[in-house]
Image (cartoon, rainbow, N blue to C red):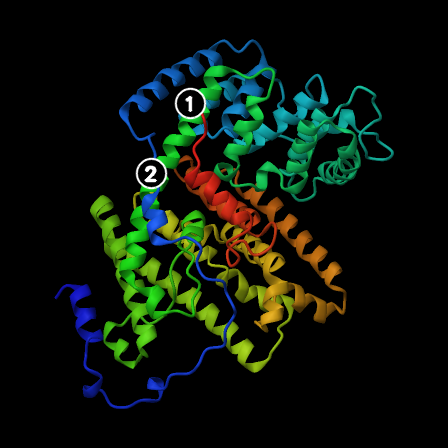
Amino acid sequence: MDCNKQLQSVLQTSSSEMKPQANDIVHERRSANYKPNIWSYDYLQSLSSIYDGQEYERRVQKLKEDVRIIFANAVDSVATFELIDSVNKLGLASHFDMEIKEALDTIASTKKKISSPEEDLYTTALCFRLFRQHGYEVSQDMFRGFMDEKTGLIRENPHINIKEMLELLEASHLGLEGENILDVARDFLTATLKESISSLDSDLAKQVVHVLELPSQRRVQWFDVKWHINSYEKDIHMNSSLLELAKLHFNIVQAILQKDLRESSRWWRNLGLTENLSFARDRLAESFMCSVGLAFEPEWDVSETQQLPECMKTCFLALYNTTNEIANEIQEKKGAWNQVLPHLKKGWTDFCNALFVEAKWYNMGYTPSLQEYLSNGWISSTAPLLLVHEFFSMGHEVTNGMEDFLEKNQEIVYNISMIIRLCNDLGTSVAERARGDVPSSILCYMREADVSEEIAQKHIEDMINKSWKKINAQCFNQLPMLQSFVNIATNNARGAHSLYQYGDGFGVQDRDTRKNIVSLLVEPLVL
């Protein structure tokens, strides 16, 4: 029997045929006072774009050829670095993978040693950042020539400008554990640039504030593309073909996302969870932006659904059907359904068990130690669950070696998960404490170390910084076939920074998250 029909048959069993059980008792749930969803079904279905026609694709192909000519005509390494940087920031890197790799390989091969400094601080920092971002081994020693040996700070130089400082600050966020030169530079530049903001012209001040708020290494690139396009348009060295390509590409991608969101909206409404699970947050658009998964229930035995109350039957049906559909889709592409499904089931089981631990803590009024909290919290962050879905959904060949990838790379999974958990706690702890939810990492550390909330927040921020250094190191030496997955996996951590940068960007819809959704999914760029 088809698994979906079998499940529906079980779920439709008449309650009169079932023996009364304790779990039939309906308990009133405490309210978290979440605001209602601001994105109506009709509004999401109305989203449309003119940028889905073949004429725009033809124009894109012509502009891509123009940009390839720019790559070929780059006069020196500085021009090449700046072109690569612009292409990355404008969201076009995937179109020029070959050109970028060939350019960086050529520059690396002409250098006796990549770690030797360039002519000036700006070029050196840009070189360092781009090589590190693209997986080349490069040392912090590149910057020794610009540092004072006694103080460790940037040597006083009247010619060092804001542009150089910004580039070095960006580079410092790709540091590894033990790279003290970059640590000192980051602290010094952060303080110096904060002091300089009031004296800068408005456009330069906006760039400084943008980097100080969140460096590019910790931003989801696509979330940042529109900002960089608007900034690039004001650059006196702007290339018109590159700008037009960036705008057109953004609008075409937005049109595709609108179509996906309309389909997701229909799927979400057909599931009926909003009506049947009214206590849960209805956050389809936010989940769409973050690629967040659905609900929970660890038991995978269809026959056991008779033991569940009605609301959990609804939840389980949605989870069961959706997960089997995902596995089925992978089977059609790779013929590996029986190998994939156990991994997806385990991901959901671990996630639901972690939520259950937090529920027990709440009901017991228990505050765990920070270590105990995080040993469970990195799993309840949803990151391990998301990563296993992302891994198999990328179309990798499912071999025994590939199946072991997540196990062998548990450290990078752990560090990404830690960043998501800790960013979430920094953004939501105040509201969760007011609701009386389970203690966050901040409250756990406050009680454990007997410190103020401000000191606890600083400790959590330091933990996030350490996790990023470990991720920076772990991104090197991956198999080429897995590098794209590692990049997408790291975007989960970047997404957490974006979502919780100004508070609870998921639970509270009508602030910065709303602006981002409208900017990225609704409003096209003017060509």
Outermost residue to the left: 1
In the image, 179: left or right of 152? left
442 and 476: which is toward the camera? 442
Q: Which residue is mark 2?
A: 48
Can you say whether 177 is above or below 432 in the image?
above
In the image, 292: left or right of 191? left
Q: Secondary structure at mark 1?
A: helix
Is residue 310 shown to the viewer in this render?
yes
The image quarter containing residue 257 is top left
The image quarter containing residue 208 is top right
Q: Residue 442, how many percent across, how many down?
A: 66, 63
Can you say whether 115 is above or below 522 in the image?
above
Quarter of the image with the N terminus in it: bottom left
User: Residue placed at 68% from the left, 19% from the top?
Assistant: 118
Can you say whether 93 is above or below 413 in the image?
above
Q: Which residue is mark 1?
A: 98
